[in-house]
Amino acid sequence: MLLAQITDLHVREPGNPLAGRVDTASFLDRMVARLNALLPRPGAVLITGDLIDNGSEAEYRLLRQRLAGLDMPAYLALGNHDGREAFRACFTDLDYRDAGTAFVQYAVDLDGIRLLVLDTHEPGKPSGALCLERLNWLSERLGEDRTTPTVVAMHHPPVPVGMPRMDPSRLLAGAERFKELIACAPNVERILAGHLHRPVTVRFAGTVLDVMPGAAHQIHLDLLGEGPLSFAFEPPMLQLHAMVPGAGLVSHKVYAEPSDGPYPFRGG
């Protein structure tokens, strides 16, 4: 199984670019083309939140149109820019959402990898939350299988990463209990997140937290927190996750825009 991950699409309607200059929908079109062209082709794509920018049904309808071009299934998570009710209204036909919970959380078996998707959306707040119901759901799912390699996907990182302008909007409510649950599940190979619009890796609760850049724009890396929160046109990336014998889950970061090459090495 080759699982691709992209994040933070922030899709907006035509004629309404983000910050007056980012046509996020066109960036998604390029990402879809890149995913379809990969060899070997991923079996599925995980999108870790901020699917759209203003939480509207119109944006979700546009998102559906753009994702229809994917040659593989997409599994969606919600972020702080999403809207749970608008999402449900536009994706009523999803066959993987757990009907036993009001939140957009679900488990999927992907040919050797178990994917658990969490809903950290907290209406009206940039930070994330996992209430008791969502945490109990995770506890039950983790308890069902302690052996299959498992990926936990969520939008908000559960720990600070040294970005003073972004750390206050991480996962706040429920973060300590989440850490306890992950620490008791040794088969969790990776926690995948977005939100930061930066590539960040950190050890967490006995596993690895891996945060991906956005599909369009990135957040300027400011480790001092002295300037305003700003975005930058650094290259978008996607990530490919594969189970490799003798290594476990291996993650490869890939630039969304194709580069010149490849050129064979020559000489001795």
Image: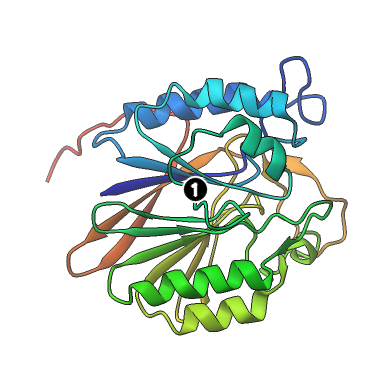
Looking at the rendered structure, the secondary structure element under dot 1 is loop
Q: How many marks?
A: 1
Q: Which residue is mark 1?
A: 97
- At horizontal 28% and vertical 75% (from top left) the residue drawn is 147
Where is residue 12 drawn, in percent x and y?
Answer: 71, 26
**Residue 209, relative to residue 204: is it above or below?**
above
The image quadrant that residue 44 belongs to is top left
The image quadrant that residue 21 belongs to is top right
Q: Residues within 10 Å of mark 1 (few under 14, many from 20)?
A: many
- At horizontal 49% and vertical 48% (from top left) the residue drawn is 97
Q: Residue furthest front?
A: 100
**163 left or right of 143 in image:** right
Q: Residue furthest top?
A: 15
**201 left or right of 232 in image:** left
**Residue 99, relative to residue 149: is it above or below?**
above
Where is residue 261 drawn, in percent x and y?
Answer: 32, 29
- At horizontal 76% and vertical 23% (from top left) the residue drawn is 17
**137 left or right of 3 in image:** right
Q: Which amino acid lies under the numbered mark 1 shown in the image of this protein?
A: Arg
Would you say residue 12 is visible in this rendering?
no
Where is residue 238 drawn, in percent x and y?
Answer: 46, 42
Would you say residue 8 is visible in this rendering?
yes
